[in-house]
Image: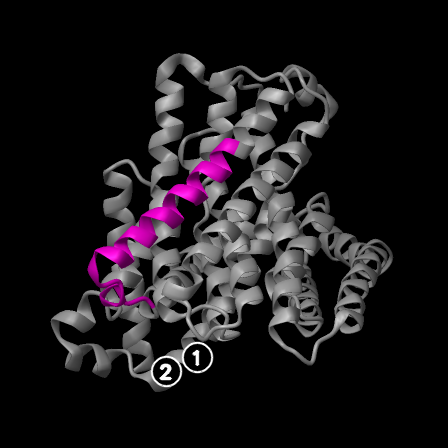
Protein backbone atom coordinates (compact mmCIF):
# COMPACT_ATOMS: atom_id res chain seq x y z
CA UNK A 1 0.00 0.00 0.00
CA UNK A 2 2.92 2.32 0.69
CA UNK A 3 4.00 2.28 -2.96
CA UNK A 4 0.43 2.84 -4.12
CA UNK A 5 0.25 5.87 -1.82
CA UNK A 6 3.45 7.24 -3.29
CA UNK A 7 2.22 6.75 -6.85
CA UNK A 8 -1.10 8.48 -6.11
CA UNK A 9 0.63 11.41 -4.36
CA UNK A 10 3.15 11.92 -7.18
CA UNK A 11 0.45 11.75 -9.86
CA UNK A 12 -1.90 14.10 -7.97
CA UNK A 13 0.84 16.63 -7.24
CA UNK A 14 2.07 16.56 -10.84
CA UNK A 15 -1.46 17.05 -12.19
CA UNK A 16 -2.34 19.83 -9.75
CA UNK A 17 1.05 21.47 -10.24
CA UNK A 18 0.52 21.44 -14.01
CA UNK A 19 -2.94 22.96 -13.64
CA UNK A 20 -1.58 25.61 -11.28
CA UNK A 21 1.02 26.63 -13.87
CA UNK A 22 -1.66 26.74 -16.56
CA UNK A 23 -3.62 29.31 -14.56
CA UNK A 24 -0.52 31.42 -13.83
CA UNK A 25 0.41 30.04 -10.41
CA UNK A 26 3.61 28.35 -9.24
CA UNK A 27 3.67 24.57 -8.93
CA UNK A 28 3.90 24.59 -5.15
CA UNK A 29 0.36 26.00 -4.90
CA UNK A 30 -0.91 23.06 -6.90
CA UNK A 31 1.11 20.59 -4.82
CA UNK A 32 -0.31 21.91 -1.54
CA UNK A 33 -3.78 21.80 -3.09
CA UNK A 34 -3.18 18.17 -4.08
CA UNK A 35 -2.56 17.35 -0.43
CA UNK A 36 -5.86 18.99 0.52
CA UNK A 37 -7.68 17.02 -2.18
CA UNK A 38 -6.18 13.72 -0.99
CA UNK A 39 -6.76 14.47 2.69
CA UNK A 40 -9.86 14.43 4.88
CA UNK A 41 -10.97 17.80 3.50
CA UNK A 42 -12.02 16.37 0.11
CA UNK A 43 -11.36 12.65 -0.42
CA UNK A 44 -12.08 11.85 3.22
CA UNK A 45 -15.34 13.80 3.05
CA UNK A 46 -16.44 12.22 -0.23
CA UNK A 47 -15.55 8.63 0.65
CA UNK A 48 -14.05 8.02 4.11
CA UNK A 49 -13.62 4.32 3.40
CA UNK A 50 -11.46 4.88 0.33
CA UNK A 51 -9.44 7.53 2.15
CA UNK A 52 -8.75 5.24 5.11
CA UNK A 53 -7.84 2.41 2.76
CA UNK A 54 -5.33 4.43 0.74
CA UNK A 55 -3.94 6.55 3.60
CA UNK A 56 -4.19 4.51 6.82
CA UNK A 57 -2.95 6.09 10.02
CA UNK A 58 -0.20 3.48 10.26
CA UNK A 59 1.54 4.90 7.16
CA UNK A 60 1.80 8.48 8.44
CA UNK A 61 5.23 8.05 10.03
CA UNK A 62 6.96 6.69 6.93
CA UNK A 63 5.48 9.40 4.70
CA UNK A 64 6.57 12.07 7.16
CA UNK A 65 10.16 10.79 7.19
CA UNK A 66 10.33 10.70 3.41
CA UNK A 67 9.01 14.25 3.25
CA UNK A 68 11.64 15.42 5.73
CA UNK A 69 14.39 13.98 3.54
CA UNK A 70 12.99 16.10 0.73
CA UNK A 71 13.07 19.23 2.89
CA UNK A 72 16.69 18.60 3.87
CA UNK A 73 17.90 18.09 0.30
CA UNK A 74 15.92 21.06 -1.02
CA UNK A 75 17.24 23.36 1.70
CA UNK A 76 20.79 22.33 0.79
CA UNK A 77 20.02 23.19 -2.82
CA UNK A 78 18.61 26.57 -1.79
CA UNK A 79 21.71 27.30 0.26
CA UNK A 80 23.89 26.75 -2.80
CA UNK A 81 21.98 29.42 -4.68
CA UNK A 82 21.76 32.04 -1.94
CA UNK A 83 24.08 34.99 -2.51
CA UNK A 84 23.66 38.12 -0.38
CA UNK A 85 23.44 41.29 -2.47
CA UNK A 86 26.88 42.63 -3.29
CA UNK A 87 27.82 46.28 -2.98
CA UNK A 88 27.34 46.96 -6.68
CA UNK A 89 23.86 45.45 -6.59
CA UNK A 90 22.98 47.39 -3.47
CA UNK A 91 24.27 50.60 -5.00
CA UNK A 92 22.08 50.02 -8.06
CA UNK A 93 19.08 49.87 -5.76
CA UNK A 94 19.98 53.13 -4.08
CA UNK A 95 20.51 51.53 -0.69
CA UNK A 96 23.33 50.02 1.27
CA UNK A 97 23.76 46.43 2.34
CA UNK A 98 21.36 47.20 5.20
CA UNK A 99 18.40 46.72 2.79
CA UNK A 100 17.86 42.94 3.13
CA UNK A 101 18.53 43.12 6.87
CA UNK A 102 15.96 45.86 7.43
CA UNK A 103 13.43 44.10 5.21
CA UNK A 104 13.95 40.90 7.18
CA UNK A 105 13.64 42.73 10.50
CA UNK A 106 10.48 44.73 9.81
CA UNK A 107 9.06 41.94 7.65
CA UNK A 108 9.31 39.63 10.66
CA UNK A 109 8.55 41.97 13.57
CA UNK A 110 5.36 43.54 12.21
CA UNK A 111 3.52 40.27 11.35
CA UNK A 112 4.89 38.71 14.55
CA UNK A 113 3.34 41.50 16.64
CA UNK A 114 0.05 41.27 14.75
CA UNK A 115 0.08 37.47 15.11
CA UNK A 116 0.59 37.78 18.86
CA UNK A 117 -2.28 40.27 19.03
CA UNK A 118 -4.62 37.99 17.06
CA UNK A 119 -3.61 35.00 19.20
CA UNK A 120 -4.34 36.88 22.43
CA UNK A 121 -7.69 37.95 21.00
CA UNK A 122 -8.61 34.45 19.79
CA UNK A 123 -7.13 32.32 22.58
CA UNK A 124 -10.32 31.72 24.55
CA UNK A 125 -12.28 30.93 21.39
CA UNK A 126 -9.83 28.87 19.31
CA UNK A 127 -7.44 27.35 21.84
CA UNK A 128 -9.15 26.87 25.21
CA UNK A 129 -7.13 24.55 27.39
CA UNK A 130 -3.90 25.11 25.47
CA UNK A 131 -0.99 26.88 27.21
CA UNK A 132 -1.29 30.60 26.53
CA UNK A 133 2.33 31.74 26.12
CA UNK A 134 3.44 29.03 23.65
CA UNK A 135 0.24 29.42 21.61
CA UNK A 136 0.52 33.20 21.44
CA UNK A 137 4.22 33.21 20.54
CA UNK A 138 3.78 30.42 18.02
CA UNK A 139 1.05 32.31 16.16
CA UNK A 140 3.41 35.27 15.95
CA UNK A 141 6.14 33.08 14.43
CA UNK A 142 3.70 31.44 12.02
CA UNK A 143 2.53 34.78 10.65
CA UNK A 144 6.06 36.21 10.49
CA UNK A 145 7.90 33.61 8.43
CA UNK A 146 8.67 33.62 4.71
CA UNK A 147 9.70 30.65 2.58
CA UNK A 148 12.94 30.77 0.62
CA UNK A 149 12.29 27.57 -1.40
CA UNK A 150 8.85 28.72 -2.53
CA UNK A 151 10.15 32.18 -3.31
CA UNK A 152 12.97 30.69 -5.36
CA UNK A 153 10.50 28.71 -7.44
CA UNK A 154 8.37 31.79 -8.04
CA UNK A 155 11.43 33.83 -9.02
CA UNK A 156 12.61 31.10 -11.40
CA UNK A 157 9.15 30.65 -12.93
CA UNK A 158 8.92 34.39 -13.61
CA UNK A 159 12.45 34.59 -15.04
CA UNK A 160 13.72 36.93 -12.32
CA UNK A 161 16.87 34.95 -11.42
CA UNK A 162 19.22 37.86 -12.17
CA UNK A 163 16.93 40.56 -10.83
CA UNK A 164 18.56 42.60 -8.01
CA UNK A 165 15.29 43.17 -6.16
CA UNK A 166 14.33 39.51 -6.34
CA UNK A 167 17.77 38.56 -5.00
CA UNK A 168 17.38 41.11 -2.20
CA UNK A 169 14.00 39.62 -1.27
CA UNK A 170 15.55 36.13 -1.25
CA UNK A 171 18.36 37.27 1.02
CA UNK A 172 15.85 38.93 3.35
CA UNK A 173 13.73 35.78 3.38
CA UNK A 174 16.80 33.72 4.26
CA UNK A 175 17.47 35.97 7.25
CA UNK A 176 13.81 35.75 8.23
CA UNK A 177 13.95 31.95 8.04
CA UNK A 178 17.02 31.78 10.29
CA UNK A 179 15.40 34.16 12.79
CA UNK A 180 12.22 32.11 12.55
CA UNK A 181 14.08 28.93 13.52
CA UNK A 182 15.58 30.74 16.49
CA UNK A 183 12.18 31.99 17.63
CA UNK A 184 10.69 28.57 17.08
CA UNK A 185 13.35 27.02 19.31
CA UNK A 186 12.45 29.52 22.03
CA UNK A 187 8.74 28.70 21.71
CA UNK A 188 9.45 24.96 21.77
CA UNK A 189 11.53 25.40 24.89
CA UNK A 190 8.80 27.40 26.62
CA UNK A 191 6.23 24.78 25.63
CA UNK A 192 8.03 22.23 27.79
CA UNK A 193 7.87 23.34 31.42
CA UNK A 194 11.00 21.37 32.31
CA UNK A 195 13.05 23.43 29.90
CA UNK A 196 14.22 26.50 31.76
CA UNK A 197 16.27 29.49 30.69
CA UNK A 198 19.48 27.57 31.30
CA UNK A 199 18.56 24.80 28.86
CA UNK A 200 17.42 27.35 26.30
CA UNK A 201 20.74 29.17 26.59
CA UNK A 202 22.60 25.88 26.15
CA UNK A 203 20.57 25.09 23.03
CA UNK A 204 21.30 28.47 21.43
CA UNK A 205 24.95 28.22 22.43
CA UNK A 206 25.07 24.74 20.95
CA UNK A 207 23.77 25.89 17.57
CA UNK A 208 26.30 28.74 17.54
CA UNK A 209 29.16 26.34 18.27
CA UNK A 210 27.85 23.96 15.65
CA UNK A 211 27.82 26.75 13.04
CA UNK A 212 31.44 27.63 13.78
CA UNK A 213 32.44 23.97 13.71
CA UNK A 214 30.61 23.45 10.42
CA UNK A 215 32.54 26.30 8.83
CA UNK A 216 35.87 24.90 10.06
CA UNK A 217 35.12 21.33 8.99
CA UNK A 218 33.90 22.47 5.58
CA UNK A 219 37.00 24.53 4.90
CA UNK A 220 39.66 22.13 6.13
CA UNK A 221 38.10 18.68 5.63
CA UNK A 222 35.08 18.50 3.35
CA UNK A 223 36.07 21.07 0.73
CA UNK A 224 39.58 19.63 0.10
CA UNK A 225 38.08 16.14 -0.27
CA UNK A 226 35.54 17.44 -2.78
CA UNK A 227 38.17 19.30 -4.79
CA UNK A 228 40.33 16.18 -5.07
CA UNK A 229 37.35 14.04 -6.09
CA UNK A 230 36.29 16.63 -8.68
CA UNK A 231 39.82 16.73 -10.12
CA UNK A 232 39.56 12.94 -10.63
CA UNK A 233 36.13 13.52 -12.20
CA UNK A 234 34.71 11.11 -9.63
CA UNK A 235 31.19 12.50 -9.32
CA UNK A 236 30.00 9.51 -7.34
CA UNK A 237 32.55 10.28 -4.64
CA UNK A 238 31.64 13.99 -4.74
CA UNK A 239 27.99 13.39 -4.03
CA UNK A 240 28.61 10.63 -1.55
CA UNK A 241 30.65 13.12 0.49
CA UNK A 242 28.10 15.90 0.02
CA UNK A 243 25.07 13.77 0.89
CA UNK A 244 26.67 12.30 4.01
CA UNK A 245 27.83 15.75 5.15
CA UNK A 246 24.36 17.24 4.68
CA UNK A 247 22.59 14.39 6.46
CA UNK A 248 24.99 14.46 9.41
CA UNK A 249 24.64 18.25 9.64
CA UNK A 250 20.84 17.99 9.55
CA UNK A 251 20.94 15.33 12.25
CA UNK A 252 23.12 17.46 14.51
CA UNK A 253 20.85 20.50 14.30
CA UNK A 254 17.80 18.31 14.92
CA UNK A 255 19.46 16.86 18.03
CA UNK A 256 20.15 20.41 19.24
CA UNK A 257 16.45 21.22 19.17
CA UNK A 258 16.40 22.97 15.80
CA UNK A 259 14.79 21.63 12.66
CA UNK A 260 16.95 19.52 10.36
CA UNK A 261 16.36 21.96 7.48
CA UNK A 262 18.60 24.57 9.13
CA UNK A 263 21.42 22.03 9.24
CA UNK A 264 21.06 21.49 5.50
CA UNK A 265 20.99 25.19 4.60
CA UNK A 266 24.38 26.04 6.10
CA UNK A 267 26.39 23.36 4.20
CA UNK A 268 24.75 24.53 0.99
CA UNK A 269 25.94 28.08 1.55
CA UNK A 270 29.44 26.87 2.44
CA UNK A 271 29.80 24.56 -0.56
CA UNK A 272 28.21 26.73 -3.23
CA UNK A 273 31.57 27.78 -4.72
CA UNK A 274 33.15 24.31 -4.77
CA UNK A 275 33.76 23.20 -8.37
CA UNK A 276 31.32 20.62 -9.76
CA UNK A 277 29.01 20.61 -6.73
CA UNK A 278 26.47 23.28 -7.62
CA UNK A 279 26.72 22.62 -11.35
CA UNK A 280 26.09 18.89 -11.03
CA UNK A 281 23.63 18.85 -8.12
CA UNK A 282 20.55 19.50 -10.23
CA UNK A 283 21.62 16.84 -12.72
CA UNK A 284 22.00 14.19 -10.04
CA UNK A 285 19.29 15.08 -7.51
CA UNK A 286 17.04 17.85 -8.81
CA UNK A 287 14.49 15.71 -10.62
CA UNK A 288 14.17 13.22 -7.77
CA UNK A 289 13.67 15.98 -5.18
CA UNK A 290 11.05 17.91 -7.17
CA UNK A 291 9.22 14.88 -8.56
CA UNK A 292 9.04 12.65 -5.49
CA UNK A 293 10.30 14.07 -2.20
CA UNK A 294 8.74 17.53 -2.19
CA UNK A 295 5.27 16.43 -3.33
CA UNK A 296 5.29 13.92 -0.46
CA UNK A 297 5.90 16.69 2.08
CA UNK A 298 3.30 19.06 0.64
CA UNK A 299 0.71 16.31 0.41
CA UNK A 300 1.57 15.13 3.94
CA UNK A 301 0.62 18.58 5.23
CA UNK A 302 -2.66 18.41 3.36
CA UNK A 303 -3.41 14.95 4.72
CA UNK A 304 -3.41 16.44 8.23
CA UNK A 305 -5.69 19.33 7.28
CA UNK A 306 -9.44 19.03 7.60
CA UNK A 307 -11.43 22.01 6.40
CA UNK A 308 -14.49 20.52 8.11
CA UNK A 309 -12.96 21.71 11.40
CA UNK A 310 -13.68 25.30 10.31
CA UNK A 311 -17.39 25.32 11.01
CA UNK A 312 -19.66 28.32 11.19
CA UNK A 313 -19.18 31.98 10.48
CA UNK A 314 -17.15 32.54 13.64
CA UNK A 315 -14.41 30.14 12.54
CA UNK A 316 -14.24 31.66 9.06
CA UNK A 317 -14.07 35.09 10.67
CA UNK A 318 -10.93 34.07 12.57
CA UNK A 319 -9.41 32.63 9.41
CA UNK A 320 -9.93 36.00 7.70
CA UNK A 321 -8.40 37.78 10.70
CA UNK A 322 -5.27 35.59 10.53
CA UNK A 323 -5.09 36.13 6.77
CA UNK A 324 -5.46 39.91 7.00
CA UNK A 325 -3.00 40.29 9.86
CA UNK A 326 -0.38 38.05 8.25
CA UNK A 327 -0.55 39.68 4.84
CA UNK A 328 -0.73 43.25 6.15
CA UNK A 329 2.14 42.71 8.57
CA UNK A 330 4.48 41.01 6.09
CA UNK A 331 3.69 43.26 3.13
CA UNK A 332 3.57 46.40 5.25
CA UNK A 333 6.79 45.68 7.12
CA UNK A 334 8.74 44.79 3.97
CA UNK A 335 7.30 47.76 2.08
CA UNK A 336 8.16 50.16 4.89
CA UNK A 337 11.73 48.85 5.13
CA UNK A 338 12.26 49.20 1.38
CA UNK A 339 10.88 52.76 1.40
CA UNK A 340 13.12 53.71 4.36
CA UNK A 341 16.10 52.55 2.29
CA UNK A 342 15.06 54.78 -0.60
CA UNK A 343 13.33 52.40 -3.01
CA UNK A 344 10.48 53.60 -5.21
CA UNK A 345 6.94 52.64 -4.16
CA UNK A 346 6.57 50.12 -6.98
CA UNK A 347 9.84 48.38 -6.16
CA UNK A 348 8.96 48.33 -2.46
CA UNK A 349 5.59 46.74 -3.32
CA UNK A 350 7.41 44.18 -5.48
CA UNK A 351 9.55 43.11 -2.53
CA UNK A 352 6.57 43.10 -0.16
CA UNK A 353 4.66 40.86 -2.56
CA UNK A 354 7.51 38.34 -2.79
CA UNK A 355 8.01 38.26 0.97
CA UNK A 356 4.44 36.99 1.41
CA UNK A 357 5.37 33.61 -0.09
CA UNK A 358 5.17 31.28 2.89
CA UNK A 359 4.40 27.78 1.61
CA UNK A 360 7.25 25.48 2.65
CA UNK A 361 8.54 27.29 5.73
CA UNK A 362 5.01 27.82 7.01
CA UNK A 363 4.10 24.16 6.62
CA UNK A 364 7.25 23.07 8.45
CA UNK A 365 6.54 25.46 11.31
CA UNK A 366 2.91 24.37 11.54
CA UNK A 367 3.83 20.69 11.53
CA UNK A 368 6.20 21.30 14.44
CA UNK A 369 3.53 23.23 16.33
CA UNK A 370 1.05 20.43 15.85
CA UNK A 371 3.56 17.80 17.00
CA UNK A 372 4.47 19.83 20.10
CA UNK A 373 0.83 20.21 21.09
CA UNK A 374 0.96 24.01 20.80
CA UNK A 375 -1.62 24.34 18.02
CA UNK A 376 -5.18 22.98 18.11
CA UNK A 377 -6.08 21.08 14.91
CA UNK A 378 -8.57 23.82 13.99
CA UNK A 379 -5.92 26.56 14.14
CA UNK A 380 -3.48 24.30 12.27
CA UNK A 381 -6.04 23.96 9.47
CA UNK A 382 -6.63 27.71 9.42
CA UNK A 383 -2.93 28.46 9.13
CA UNK A 384 -2.40 25.85 6.39
CA UNK A 385 -5.13 27.60 4.39
CA UNK A 386 -3.49 30.91 5.28
CA UNK A 387 -0.18 29.62 3.86
CA UNK A 388 -1.91 28.44 0.68
CA UNK A 389 -3.77 31.70 0.12
CA UNK A 390 -0.83 34.03 0.78
CA UNK A 391 1.45 31.93 -1.42
CA UNK A 392 -1.16 31.86 -4.19
CA UNK A 393 -1.42 35.66 -3.98
CA UNK A 394 2.32 36.15 -4.49
CA UNK A 395 2.66 35.37 -8.20
CA UNK A 396 -0.34 37.49 -9.33
CA UNK A 397 0.84 40.42 -7.18
CA UNK A 398 4.38 40.25 -8.56
CA UNK A 399 3.06 40.02 -12.12
CA UNK A 400 0.81 43.00 -11.44
CA UNK A 401 3.77 45.09 -10.29
CA UNK A 402 5.67 44.16 -13.45
CA UNK A 403 2.72 44.96 -15.72
CA UNK A 404 2.22 48.27 -13.91
CA UNK A 405 5.59 49.42 -15.23
CA UNK A 406 7.48 48.85 -12.00
CA UNK A 407 9.55 45.89 -13.15
CA UNK A 408 12.85 46.08 -11.23
CA UNK A 409 16.22 46.47 -12.85
CA UNK A 410 17.66 43.29 -14.32
CA UNK A 411 21.42 43.08 -14.52
CA UNK A 412 22.99 39.84 -15.79
CA UNK A 413 26.23 40.78 -14.05
CA UNK A 414 24.64 40.65 -10.58
Check disc 1: other Cα within 10 Å, few if <14, some if 14-19, many if 20+. few
Which contiguous range is marked in magenta? 305-332
Residue highlighted by disc 1: 62
* Quarter of the figure with the C terminus: top right
Q: Secondary structure at mark 1?
A: helix
Is residue 80 something one can see in this rendering? yes
Task: Confirm or deny contact between disc 2 and disc 1 (CB under 8 A).
Answer: yes
The residue sitting at 77% across, 52% down in the picture is 227
Name the mark on residue 6.
none
Q: Report if residue 284 is visible in the image.
A: no
* x and y, in percent, of residue 324 in the image: 38, 42
Q: Is residue 322 magenta?
A: yes
Which colour style is shown?
Answer: one colour
> In the picture provided, is 199 more to the left or to the right than 71?
right
Quadrant of the image occupied by residue 290: bottom left
Q: Quadrant of the N terminus?
A: bottom left
Residue under the image location 28 percent in, 55 percent down: 33
Q: Where residue 59 is drawn, which disc sits there?
A: 2
Amino acid sequence: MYFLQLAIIILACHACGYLAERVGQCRVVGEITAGLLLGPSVLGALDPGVHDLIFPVSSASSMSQLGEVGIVLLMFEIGMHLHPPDRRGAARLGAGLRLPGLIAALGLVMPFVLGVAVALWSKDVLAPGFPTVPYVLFCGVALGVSAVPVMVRIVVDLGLNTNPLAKTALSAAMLTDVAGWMLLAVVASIAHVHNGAGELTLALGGIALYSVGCVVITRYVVQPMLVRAAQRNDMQAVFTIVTCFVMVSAGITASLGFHSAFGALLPGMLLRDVPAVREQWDRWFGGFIRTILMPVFFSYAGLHTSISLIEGGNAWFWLCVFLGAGFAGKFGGSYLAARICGLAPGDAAFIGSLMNARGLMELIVLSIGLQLGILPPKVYTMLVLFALVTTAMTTPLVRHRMRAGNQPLADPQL
